[in-house]
Amino acid sequence: MKLKHICEVCGREDILTPKEAFDAGWDYPPEMGTFGIVSQRTCPNCPINKTVWWKIAVEHKSPSTLPGEDKAVIERILHEPESILVDE
């Protein structure tokens, strides 16, 4: 199954299988984390401390106070894997 992997920090997009993504260094479910649960969604080059998860878990920001682009990331995550499916 191919999925669109979207880095929430830099915006990079790659279409990969979960194994390919994991081997390439992506932090993405199902190999890293769980679909539908807010955690980092980063490419191999970006840090975790710029993610929505970091803002909520470490900086203790309320999701309601986050900017629109962060809310869009949360919405995409909550609807995974459907929100990142790719037609093969």
Image (cartoon, rainbow, N blue to C red):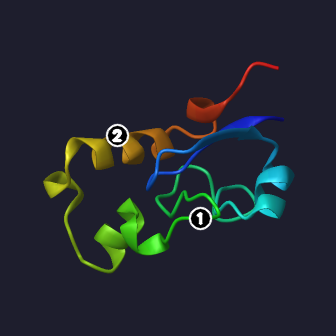
Looking at the image, is 8 positioned above or below residue 45?
A: above
The residue that appears at 56% across and 32% down in the rendered structure is: 83
Numbered label attached to residue 20? none
Q: State which mark lies toward you, 2 or 1.
A: 1
* Residue type at tag 1: Asn
Q: Position of residue 71 (x, y in %)?
A: 29, 45
Q: Earlier in the sequence, mark 2 or mark 1?
A: 1
Q: In the image shown, does 48 or 83 lie closer to the viewer? A: 48
The reply to whether callout 2 and callout 1 are in contact (CB within 8 Å) is: no
Q: Where is residue 12 in the image (x, y as percent from the top left)?
A: 55, 45
Q: Position of residue 59 (x, y in %)?
A: 25, 78
Which quadrant of the view contains residue 73? Answer: top left
Q: Residues within 10 Å of mark 2 (few under 14, many from 20)?
A: few
Q: Which residue lies furthest to the bottom in this view?
A: 58
Instruction: Indicate the quadrant containing the C terminus: top left, top right, bottom left or bottom right.
Output: top right
Residue that badge 2 annotates: 72
The residue that appears at 52% across and 65% down in the rendered structure is: 46
Instruction: Indicate the quadrant containing the N terminus: top left, top right, bottom left or bottom right.
Output: top right
Q: Distance between the residues labelled 2 and 1?
A: 21 Å
Q: How crowded is mark 1: few (under 14 residues within 10 Å), some or many (20 or more)?
A: few
Left or right, residue 33 beside residue 76: right
Numbered label attached to residue 45? 1
Left or right, residue 11 beside residue 65: right
* Residue type at tag 2: Ala
The residue that appears at 24% across and 57% down in the rendered structure is: 63
Local secondary structure at mark 2:
helix
Local secondary structure at mark 1:
loop
Which quadrant of the view contains residue 65? Answer: bottom left
The residue that appears at 49% across and 71% down in the rendered structure is: 47
Looking at the image, is 17 positioned above or below residue 41?
A: above
